[in-house]
Image: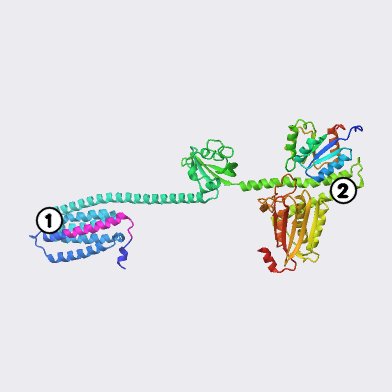
Amino acid sequence: MFLDRFIVRHEDPLQSRMAKSAAWLYWLGIAVVLTGIFLPAETDIDHGPVYLLVVGGLLSTLFLVFFPWQKISPRYFYVMAALASSHIATLVYFTGGVESPYQLLYYLIAIWAAYFFSFGGFLAVATLAIASLMAPYLYESGYDADLITLGLMRVLFMLITGGLVNLLVVQVKQRNRELALSNERLAQKVHEVLQEEEKTNAVIASVADGVFVVDNGGRVTLWNKSAEAITGYSEEEIVGRAPGDALTGGRHGQACVPFCITSDSGSRQGPGGFEVLACRRDGTDIWLSVSAAPIRDAAAREAGSVYVFRDISAYKELERIRSDFVATVSHELRTPLTSILGFSKTLLRPDAVFPADSRRSFLQEIVREGERLARMIEDILSVSRIESGSLKLDLKPVNAAASVRTVVANVSRLTEEHRFVINAADDLAQVRADADRLHQVLLNLVVNAVKYSPDGGTITVSAEGEDAILLFTVADEGVGIREECLPHVFERFYRAPVEHVSVTGTGLGLFVSKHLVEEMGGQIWAESAPGQGSSFFFRLPAASAGPEAEQQLAS
Amino acid sequence: MESATAPARHVMIVDDEASLRNLVRANLEVDGMTVSEAVDGFQAIDMLRSDQPDLILLDIMMPGKDGIAVLEELAGDPSLRRIPVILLTAKGEQEDLERGAALGARGHITKPFDPEQMVRTVKAALGIIRR
């Protein structure tokens, strides 16, 4: 469309204000024209062209009034300026030419153009106005030098006035533009900063590590949700206080480290951080890994410190268990070795002669301790295979009753205080298992039964068919297991505490047994009461069993 | 140098491992000593109240009451303080060994040990032979 050429967006509020002012200027022009028509009654005026002019002016004014000014192109105002100039020229012509007081209206046009357009635009409009202004002088003067000089003087005065206005306006516009630009930049910057802060806050709030900030005065200024969760101290309790003040009442009645670390305590650490034993709000101990870093302000001065910490209690516990395990295992391995070497060297003593039955008992000790050593090594190897996922099973039909009898026969040689009862029918169904692993599980359970019944008693080992599933039971009359310990007995390294009785072991046997049974598609569990003995059960699918038996076991 | 006229000496072995107690007993009895056994610190203290040996072979690492706890109790009891104690230790128990020495232990035997050497150490402690 033709009009679209003139329509551009006026984002600048100044420009849209100018557009409106131009419309009002135009209205003023129309009012002046009307005054010119009706006031100088004595002048001989031909009203025809004036009315035409007024109707045309009104129509264009209506258009301008209803036009969306914010979208108008500056170019359109050249058209307006041309229209206004021609209107004034007509007015001047009909109101006395050189004598007409309405010549001053050209100043309005010039000042308006100077205000609205750049200097080039102003000159274009002014040229139009000058041509209109000079025309009557040239026409009426008959090239009278004085009149032309007067006209030129008026033109010059108009140009100077308009030029000055334009200069001023250009300056103002320039400043306005700069101001608007810097405003925009500032708003953008503020937006960015707010966004950054929001992002930082979101990160600090959602990070799993505890984060807190201490200012130069040693006061906490930030305490995130994770810090709250880890220590139990809420933001309200900590923020604004010296951490050492707030976080006292630990087990040793002292401030909880690392919260007593302030910028002047000299304990500033490098980026590697440090580990400390602190305490929670409820007084329980907690191991924290803490890293600290100084916060610097814009002038690179130290403005405080930020601390990031995480709860490493579980890791520390694991570390302790592992270290205990190494100590336990080396002790447990050394014990049978001491006996094996000791009895062997005893037999070889050149200065002593032992009777035959003694020699035989020494050899029995050597065998017993050697088997114990082998069992332990087997368990340790199994743990390492279980943990690395490299445990290989050779599942085949195995004679369950024979396995039970073999294990009981082996173990019964080790003890004289215990009586063994086997409940396994000769025609018992075969079990689907890895023969060596089944032997290992049964051996672990039966040896445990012996170890945990130091006063002797009956140990009953059963294997019975339950449809397509075989149930194995090892029951003793020993010290039993406390209720609170029962859920943990299959955990790695766990050893149920037994009072006044010496029971050696690595804490691996039941852990290994559980894994082996489960790998063979079965389940294992225990029932016990202190002083009432313990019963360990495990189920495995029969060799003839279909998938439904496995589903039953899995449920 | 062995003293042929000396009366049978009494040694108490305190260890939680039956096999180790058997080993010590076999080697000392063949040399004419009598041996009593205790499975842990509690039993050892109980037995010492009624029957005082000439020497105690004491394992450090025992469940319940360990060797160091037994030594502390012996050191605090004037009637038991004079009984010489030899500690049975494993390698890497240096700290316990130092504590044991501070509490009056006469020496130590490290497991695994040579039975002949063990017998010699016991005899030296009893004054039967010189080291």
Q: Which of marks 1 and 2 is nearer the N terminus?
A: 1
The magenta span reads A9-31
According to the picture, the residue beneath numbered tag 1 turns out to be A99
Is residue A173 in view?
Answer: yes
Instruction: Report x, y in % for residue A93.
Output: 14, 60
Cα separation, mark 1 vs mark 2, equals 150 Å
Is residue A139 in view?
Answer: no
Quarter of the picture containing the N terminus of chain A is bottom left
Q: Does the magenta run of residues contain A387? A: no
Q: Nearer the viewer, residue A217 or B37?
A: B37
Image colouring: rainbow
Q: Principal SS element in the magenta part?
A: helix
Q: How many marks overall?
A: 2
Q: Are marks 1 and 2 on the same chain?
A: yes
**From the viewer's perspective, is A499 left or right of A146?**
right
Letter of the chain that mark 2 sits on in the rendering: A
Instruction: Report x, y in % for residue B37.
Output: 81, 41
According to the picture, the residue beneath numbered tag 2 turns out to be A361
Residue at left 18%, top 52%? A154
User: Which of the numbered marks, if any, corresponds to residue A466?
Assistant: none
Q: Nearer the viewer, residue A396 or A188?
A: A396
Amino acid on which disc 1 is placed:
Glu
Letter of the chain that mark 1 sits on in the rendering: A
Instruction: Report x, y in % for residue A69.
Output: 28, 60
- Dot 2 falls on a residue whose secondary structure is helix
Q: Does the magenta run of residues contain A23? A: yes
Q: Which of A228 and A304 is in front in this view?
A: A228
Quarter of the picture containing the C terminus of chain A is bottom right
